[in-house]
Amino acid sequence: MQDRLTATVVSLREGSQAIATATREIASGNADLSVRTESQAASLEETASSTEELSATVKQNSENALRARELSSSASQIAQRGHEVVSRVVSTMTEISQS
């Protein structure tokens, strides 16, 4: 009977050691997973920040392009008026020259 009791205690000790080893491995895996999760969260936060910056830059570029178009249109109108004035001056000079 004592042999069976000793065998049972030895078996229990081995089982508890196996459980302790498995528990340490699980804890280590959880710690590793936690570190990786934190790293991914930080990367995701950086990506979100970069996306916001990119969005703001695209919006600013769009506004700048619109302003450039307006300035270009204005410059074209001024050039057209200048052409008309020069044409009138040439016409007037031609009339003066012919008189």
Image (cartoon, helix red, strand yellow):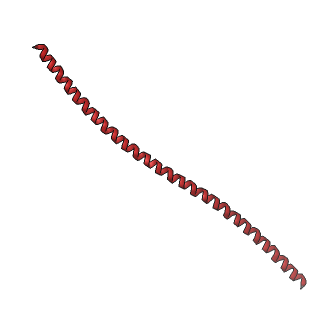
> Which part of the image, by quadrant, shows the N terminus?
bottom right
Residue 22 position by quadrant: bottom right
| As drawn, 33 above or below 13 | above
Q: Nearer the viewer, residue 4 or 33?
A: 33
Where residue 44 appears, x then y in whole percent?
54, 55
Q: Nearer the viewer, residue 71 or 41?
A: 71
Residue drawn at (46%, 51%), measured in percent from left and top? 52
> Which part of the image, by quadrant, shows the C terminus?
top left
| As drawn, 59 above or below 79 | below
Where residue 84 appears, x then y in whole percent?
19, 27
Left or right of 80? Residue 96 is left
Residue drawn at (82%, 75%), measured in percent from left and top? 13
Residue drawn at (43%, 48%), measured in percent from left and top? 56
Where residue 76 appears, x then y in whole percent?
27, 32
Residue drawn at (13%, 14%), measured in percent from left and top? 97
Where residue 11 appears, x then y in whole percent?
83, 76
| As drawn, 84 above or below 56 | above
| As drawn, 71 above or below 3 | above
Left or right of 80? Residue 68 is right
Left or right of 55? Residue 44 is right
Q: Residue furthest left?
A: 99
Q: Residue furthest bottom?
A: 1
Q: Residue furthest top?
A: 98
Count the marks: how many? 0
Q: Nearer the viewer, residue 14 or 67?
A: 67
Residue 82 position by quadrant: top left
